[in-house]
Image: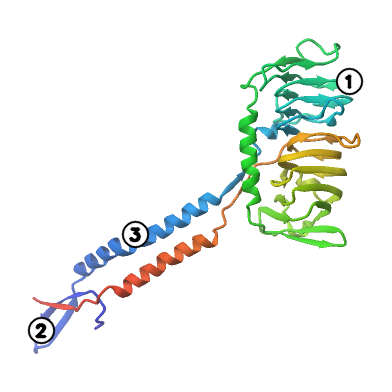
Amino acid sequence: MNDNCFLYYNVVQRDGGVLAFTPFRPYYQRIFMTFFASRTLPLISAAVFAFSCSASAQATVIDLGVANGYSAFIFGNIGSSNASGFTSVGGSLAAGGSIYLDGYSVGTNKKPGSAANTLVAGSNLNIGGGSINGTGVYGVSNANGSVTAPSWYPTGTFSKGNASTLGFAAAQQQLTTLSGDVAKLQSNGTVISQYGNMTLVGNANADVNIFNIDASNLHNLTLDLSSLKSTASIIINGTATNITMSGGFDNFASFANRTLFNFANATTTSLQNVGINGSILAPNAAFSGSGDMNGTLIANSVSSINYGHVAMNGSGFNTVNVSAVPEPGTWAMLLAGLGLLAFMRRRTPARTPQAQLA
């Protein structure tokens, strides 16, 4: 008989003077359930609760929100009195400040889900020669906003809005926070740099592939298609403060609405005669350069350098949920709870089996 067993026994006198011991099972079950409920269950529950809370806190939903309806969603100004920030825009434009356009076309290829208004300015609309497919709204954030445009535009093309038209402040806060959260995601892809080129090798089993690149010049990026699901989402975190995108970005075309370049730390971001298939989230950056984008641009402002212009040919990034990955601290809490459970089990004094005469 095991001295460590918490059983009470019935002692039965049988013929021949032989004592027979039979377990008194109902009592054993009560003892076991009492011990489990008072000692074991709370520890396991606490460990599981800590694990689930930590995991939930790390889950990240990458959703560009209201910005997804625009080819470019800018917190400050688009262009200036001396330069137009864009030449052609397939979708809609929104700027929390003023919009300056000249020699342009906007709204030429709106896609389902695009914003109703082709142009939305928090302050002024300054329109030169060009074409607008749709309507423009100004004065959304600034009641003193105005519109300057050629007289040939039909009556009703431009109208004054208000804060209910578009909440720039709330959107800026949400997108800035999102950028910071995405920057903290653990990478599961590998970046191979060789001869001035970067090859991005993903995880063939992952629905979301995350790459971290600590370089100012993102030059000649190539996706290794053999390492990616055809339905995968691509997240590229650039950690530099001044980022230039140049050369070729190969194999991104089929991932355009599932690729996000996240530049949380960037104060400047520029294109150098390059085509980008994907969206750019750079909430603190002044954006400039020349080239074209097939995605949504989110930045603090848009200017033009050396009269270069960017063509925006699309809009939208498909929302994706990045599953939580437990951090070392979570595992430590779980192991600590199990360790405490083992310690308490060892410290519990053994009970001497008792016999109860029938």
Query: How was this image coloured?
Result: rainbow
Which element type, helix, strand or loop, lies under badge 3? Answer: helix
Q: Quadrant of residue 268?
A: top right
Residue type highlighted by circle 2 = Arg
Q: Earlier in the sequence, mark 1 or mark 2?
A: 2
Separation of residues labelled 3 and 2 (CA atoms): 44 Å
Which residue lies at the image location 32% right of the left edge and 70% below the top edge? Answer: 344
Which element type, helix, strand or loop, lies under badge 2? Answer: loop
Q: Which residue is mark 2?
A: 14
Q: Which residue is mark 3?
A: 42
Residue 89: tell me if it is visible.
Answer: yes
Give the mark toward the camera: 3 or 1: 1
Which element type, helix, strand or loop, lies under badge 1? Answer: loop
Residue type highlighted by circle 3 = Pro
Left or right, 339 with respect to 156, comes to left
Find residue 5 and report its horizontal and vertical position in percent: 25, 77
Q: Quadrant of residue 97?
A: top right
Separation of residues labelled 3 and 1 (CA atoms): 72 Å
Q: Rate crowding at label 1 as few (under 14), some (14 to 19) or many (20 or more) other CA atoms within 10 Å.
A: few
Left or right, 72 with respect to 104, comes to left
Q: Nearer the viewer, residue 77 or 17?
A: 77
The N terminus - image quarter: bottom left
